[in-house]
Image: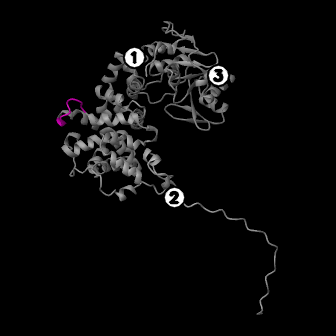
Amino acid sequence: MDMSDSALSEEKPVSVCEDESDPTEIPTRGISTTKIDKDALKVVHRLARFGYAAYLVGGCVRDLLLKLEPKDFDVATSAKPPEIRKIFRNCRLIGRRFRLAHIHFRSKIIETATFRAEAEQSDGELLIRSDNVFGNEQQDAMRRDFTINALFFDPKNRTIIDHVGGLEDLVERTIRFIGDPGIRVREDPVRILRAIKFAARLNFTIEPATYQAMVRYRKDLSKSAPPRLLEEINRMLRSGSAVASFRLMWEAGILEIILPEAACYLSRSPDRDEEREPGSGLWAYLKQIDRSEREFLSNAVLLAAVLLHPVADASCNGTQAYGVASDSNATGEVARKLLEKIIGRLNLPKWEAERIQQLVATQRRLFTLRRNAPLPKGLMRRNYFPEALDLFEIGVRATGKGRATLARLRKAYRPQNPADASNGVAARRGAPASAKKSGRKKKRKRRPAQSRPYQRPAESKEK
């Protein structure tokens, strides 16, 4: 998604003034208020009516300038979290490390954060463990991660406020850390994955000093909270740029830190005579994920698409290269061994690991099903079959094999209760219309009992 200079037609890139107290304020007509969420505008205007400074900030401003559709709208304000809660009855305060106000509307949440200053480090450690030091607007911009994510938009005056030169980097299509890249990475190593994600999704280049810091301190990712690492991996897989994200991680040596199983699979490509296109199987699956209806795929399906290839390689060529010992080369057993390591490294829930194991184990059975062989009725009754069918569909598109089997399975699959089936693509569109009607029987409405006059019961003849 390329951005031409016309996307910023009303504003010229202006360097940040040497005096940091003097921000760059640029009137803009490039952002139309009709493209902004109405509830986000309500939050900004109401905070302003109560005397607080309030702006749209971050990714939504970046995407609006790039003529993209923002996924969500964030607000930054001078109001403290308790003050925000007093103004909005539909507000909930969340977080300990980073205190936020979530303002709830019917189908969305407007995340509202107070301006923050640089967090205080203890014992000389750069890793930020608490980030609730409040500050002013300029301090808040300077403490953010990338220049393109530190732009403020004032919808009332329709001005862009730029303290860090973010507009220049938008025009130059550059990902750049704010401040010293080495310090920024060590403060929060997850910023490495965020830089990869933005560079891949926006098709931007990473500024050399930023890239060098990412590579140098990539091992610090092990200090980050495992759930945050898992969340960023899932976001990459859902971003529509999974191929570009994983290629960047592989080239920078980051993949071997967070998903060494996938990195080992790619490094062993010459052993599998894949010198021309190393890891072609993994890239083919990721390419089809980018082309698929990702919003309907579960996290288990996405992760299984990545781990399927290391598991297959370990099953065929031995598990020693992957650092696990297994008495059996069965696909399910090898998957269980590899997932045990991932559970500890990424805090993967055990139920999700079990589901991934089931999905990976079923793929060989589906791909080896012959054209005229009977369908696996027992497998089709399993509660994980809709997700297994989603993963199989990705594989069929990636390899070009099994199209007839996929068509047969789609035609034959009938969930007993579509409402309880997986919300994957297969469950949504795989069952024919007749299957959707074959669920619960429609209950008949009972007629209301007719009122009758009271009658005294007949007296018994026997006394």
Q: Is residue 229 in sight in this rendering?
A: no
Q: Is residue 270 above or below residue 304?
A: above
Residue range highlighted in magenta: 271-278
User: Mark 1 Cα within 10 Å, few/some/many (few <14, many 20+)?
Assistant: few
The residue labelled by disc 3 is 52
| Residue type, numbered disc 3 | Tyr
**Residue 427 circle label:** none
* Main secondary structure of the magenta stretch: loop
Q: CA distance from mark 3 to mark 2?
A: 55 Å
Q: Nearer the viewer, residue 2 or 46?
A: 2
The residue labelled by disc 2 is 439
Colouring scheme, one of rainbow, by chain, secondary structure, one colour: one colour
Q: Residue at x 46, y 46 (%)?
A: 429
Circle 3 sits in a helix, a strand or a loop, which is it? loop
In the shown orientation, is residue 75 left or right of residue 308?
Answer: right
Q: Residue at x 78, y 92 (%)?
A: 461
Name the N-terminal-most of marks 1 and 2. Answer: 1
**Where residue 200 appears, x then y in whole percent?**
38, 25
Q: CA distance from mark 1 to mark 2?
A: 61 Å
- Tell me the quarter of the picture where residue 215 sits: top left
The residue labelled by disc 1 is 180
| Residue type, numbered disc 1 | Asp
User: Mark 3 Cα within 10 Å, few/some/many (few <14, many 20+)?
Assistant: some
